[in-house]
């Protein structure tokens, strides 16, 4: 089935492999992704409100997501790239002895025999005229704000920066994790279409000639064994969907590379990847957020002992079903009206309930 004309209402990125594509441009593209498939699994209406509703709430700046993005930038691209993308907001604790607040500046003015009235800026200027070495928090803050005018850097807290640095050190202290992020390319975006014409997209955290690597943060507030904690994360966040979709993206990427559909500076690693006939191996690098920052590297395999992995198979079935439903909804509704499905009345069935409930 080819997606009909309603799909033409979507302005999607041309199919290809993109290097150095800004994250905001990737996320702005309306193609279906692993995240979208998860939303489709809840309901088509859930998907529409998350991805197409023009009045949807932007939830990209939650503290957890800000920290996750910062950690990814630091770990995947390094300190130099991090500081190109981010500006660390100053804090008074970073400047021992700095004077802040009206009372502190008035006291300093009195010590120097200066007039104590006026705004913080006016008092600061008087103090610096007499004592240029004086550390004044209003001046530090004002200079930082001025430096951000016209800048496209994302401003983060000092704590987020420290957490990102700790994350990078934790990854580099783990032999398997450190090697996972060597010899390849970070943040590789792939846009392709299924055989039925559904526009798809994926963004590999790290692409190597024989492997795909994805960095995941997880929390373990209950203090369970970390291996169990990452299994819980895989289950809760349906990472099997991502593994399946990424391998479909990898197959599409190889063909696109061979056809010359590469945007950005091409590289030897990309060409090596395209020449490998076998499916790449897929690894999750798990990083615990918080004080401990445990690091685990786990491979997601399609089969175990020559038998198809049940978890992998579930991800495959869920993805294929969601892609089909997405195509039907796009055909019936298009992107500009809610995907509201009229569900018929159905009785509860025993098999719908967990064993402990029956």
Image (cartoon, helix red, strand yellow):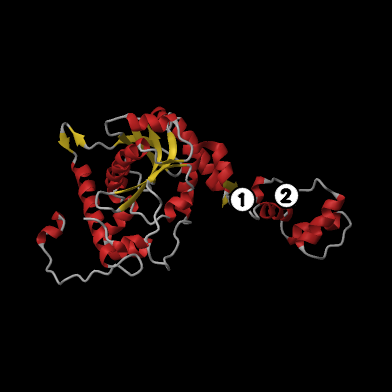
Where is residue 355? Give x, y as percent: 13, 54
Where is residue 261? Give x, y as percent: 39, 41
Classify mark 2: residues with Cα within 10 Å, few (<14), some (14-19) or many (20+): some
Query: Which image quadrant for residue 119?
Result: bottom right
Q: Residue at x 34, y 65 (%)?
A: 335
* Residue 89, label in figure: 1
Which one is in front, 75 or 247?
247
* Position above or below: 72 against 270: below
Which one is in front, 272 or 294?
272
Q: Quadrant of the N terminus?
A: bottom left
Classify mark 1: residues with Cα within 10 Å, few (<14), some (14-19) or many (20+): some
* Residue 98, label in figure: 2
Q: Residue at x 80, y 61 (%)?
A: 122
Which one is in front, 67 or 341?
341
Which one is in front, 289 or 79?
79
Tag 2 or tag 1, which sits nearer the N-term? Answer: 1
Under tag 1, what secondary structure? loop
Does the residue at mark 1 contact the one at mark 2 (Cβ under 8 Å)? no
């Amino acid at each position: 089935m080819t997606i009909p004309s309603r799909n033409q209402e979507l302005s999607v990125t041309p199919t290809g492999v993109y290097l150095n594509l800004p994250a905001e441009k990737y996320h702005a593209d309306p193609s279906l992704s692993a995240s979208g498939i998860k939303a489709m699994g809840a309901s088509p209406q859930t998907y529409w409100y998350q991805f197409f509703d023009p009045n949807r709430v932007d939830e990209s700046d939650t503290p957890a997501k800000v920290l996750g993005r910062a950690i990814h930038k630091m770990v995947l691209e390094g300190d130099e790239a991090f500081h190109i993308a981010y500006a660390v907001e100053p804090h008074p604790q970073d400047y021992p002895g700095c004077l802040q607040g009206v009372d502190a500046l008035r006291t300093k003015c009195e010590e120097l025999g200066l007039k104590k009235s006026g705004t913080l800026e006016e008092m600061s200027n008087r103090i610096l005229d007499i004592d240029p070495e004086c550390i004044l928090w209003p001046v530090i803050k004002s200079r930082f704000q001025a430096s951000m005018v016209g800048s496209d850097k994302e401003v983060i807290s000092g704590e987020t920066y420290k957490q990102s640095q700790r994350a990078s050190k934790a990854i580099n202290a783990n032999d398997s994790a450190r090697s996972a992020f060597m010899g390849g390319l970070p943040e590789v975006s792939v846009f392709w279409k299924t055989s039925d014409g559904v526009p798809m997209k994926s963004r590999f955290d790290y692409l190597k000639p024989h492997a795909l690597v994805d960095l995941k943060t997880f929390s373990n507030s209950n203090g369970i064994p970390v291996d169990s904690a990452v299994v819980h994360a895989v289950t809760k966040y349906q990472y099997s969907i991502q593994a399946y979709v990424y391998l479909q993206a990898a197959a599409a990427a190889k063909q696109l590379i061979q056809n010359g559909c590469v945007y950005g500076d091409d590289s030897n690693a990309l060409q090596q990847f395209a020449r490998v006939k076998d499916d790449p191996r897929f690894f999750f690098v798990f990083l615990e957020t918080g004080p401990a920052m445990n690091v685990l590297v786990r491979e997601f395999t399609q089969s175990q002992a020559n038998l198809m992995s049940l978890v992998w198979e579930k991800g495959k079935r869920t993805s294929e079903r969601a892609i089909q439903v997405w195509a039907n909804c796009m055909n019936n509704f298009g992107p500009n009206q809610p995907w509201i499905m009229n569900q018929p009345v159905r009785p509860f069935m025993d098999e719908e309930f967990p064993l402990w409930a029956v």
